[in-house]
Amino acid sequence: MPSALITGITGQDGLYLAELLISKGYDVHAIIRGQNNPKRELVERVVPGVTLHTGDLTDLSSLMRAINAAQPDEFYNLGAVSFVAYSWENAFVTSDVTGMGVLNALEAVRLYCGDDPTKTRFYQASSSEMFGKVQQVPQDESTLLWPRSPYGVAKVYGHYMTINYRESYGMHASSGILFNHESPRRGPEFVTRKVTTAVARIALGLQETIAMGNLDAKRDWGYAGDYVEAMWRMLQQDEADDYVIATGETHSIRDLLDVAFRHVGIDDWSQRVVQDPRFMRPAEVDLLIGDASKARERLGWAPTVDFAELVQMMVDSDLAEQRALAGK
Ligand code: GDP
């Protein structure tokens, strides 16, 4: 039975990836942070088959302990401080976890592998935020990186360190440059989930309006369930490499609001949305659109859920959740 070790198990991607690997017959282990982590219960409920090890990306010896216990064939580094807006106010901790944490993870795997550097295959969760002030549209694996937030800068560090470990030590270390990917499990701080939850509450009469930042921002949004499949496929290749994972389509926040509100029968949502400077950012990324041709060709990967289906799936899930919470 192959085994895998995941960091970031409490996040959206960690849960989808754990489910995928369990369905493929893996012995799945994960590293969970801290004492009395409030998300531990969620993980134990959604993926009860996963063995949890306590550890932290900023603590190399805890990673070594987990990796020695799990003896993984594959290591997926999904752990990060992942909210871009937060990263300006918490640049140091973001750099420490999202950047230096990758170095610790690579070191742990390198030390565990001993004189067989490909014994454990490594996946790094890189991000389209690395493209930031985009130098080319659409973006592919060779596009110059120009991050626009402390989060983006930290991800660039992790990305190049992953490439460096592959080149320096011959490790099977791959980096997936994933564009935004969403689902009903997306955290409430991200714009998609914020909108779908608010629209569900407005439809149920639980809330009147939604306060938003920049409505002209655009993203290439895909479905997280499709994107974890790409991670797994990268590690099944003979050679490690870097891959852009994206839909190749971009939509604005206005489009997002439009699809979500229309799904609950509200065609004119102009009175429902108020602009709030608290949600504006010191700097924005430009036009993010990914070119995933390499992943299509080499991994046989393609997205299965389009933008409207994704937003509708999230609104439906939030309607059910909000109804249950409100006892409706
Ligand atoms: P990101 O791509 O990782 O930063 O994902 P987010 O979901 O946090 O943000 C996507 C885009 O939505 C950014 O360009 C934000 O400026 C824009 N946006 C507009 N209003 C909001 C809001 O109220 N909350 C968030 N999170 N983003 C907003």
Image: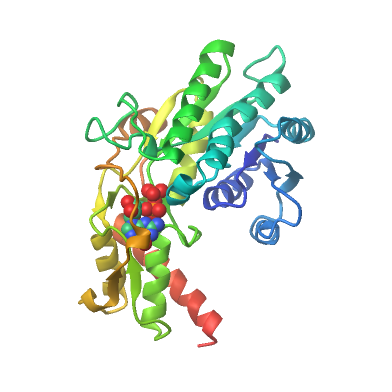
Horizontal arrangement in the rendering, residue 138 relative to residue 156 (left or right): left
Q: Nearer the viewer, residue 208 or 186?
A: 208
Q: Is residue 240 visible?
A: no
> Does 164 sit above or below residue 157?
above
Q: Position of residue 303 (x, y in %)?
A: 36, 46
> Colour mode?
rainbow
Seen in the picture, residue 254 relative to 27 is either above or below; the reply is below
Q: Give the residue at x 74% y 46%.
A: 51
301 or 140: which is nearer to us? 140
| Quarter of the image where the N terminus is located | top right
Of the pair 301 and 93, the residue shown nearer to us: 93
- Residue 222, horizontal then vertical, whole percent: 37, 50
Q: So how many labels did they put on this image?
A: 0
Quadrant observed for ligand 1 in the rendered image: bottom left
**Residue visible at 35% across and 82% down?**
208
x then y, percent, for residue 234: 48, 31
Residue 107 occupies quadrant: top right
Where residue 203 sits in the image (x, y, percent)?
A: 36, 81
Q: Is residue 145 above or below residue 265?
A: above
Asked whether the viewer can see residue 218, the reply is yes
* Picture quadrant where residue 245 is located: top left
- Which residue: 56% across, 51% down? 11
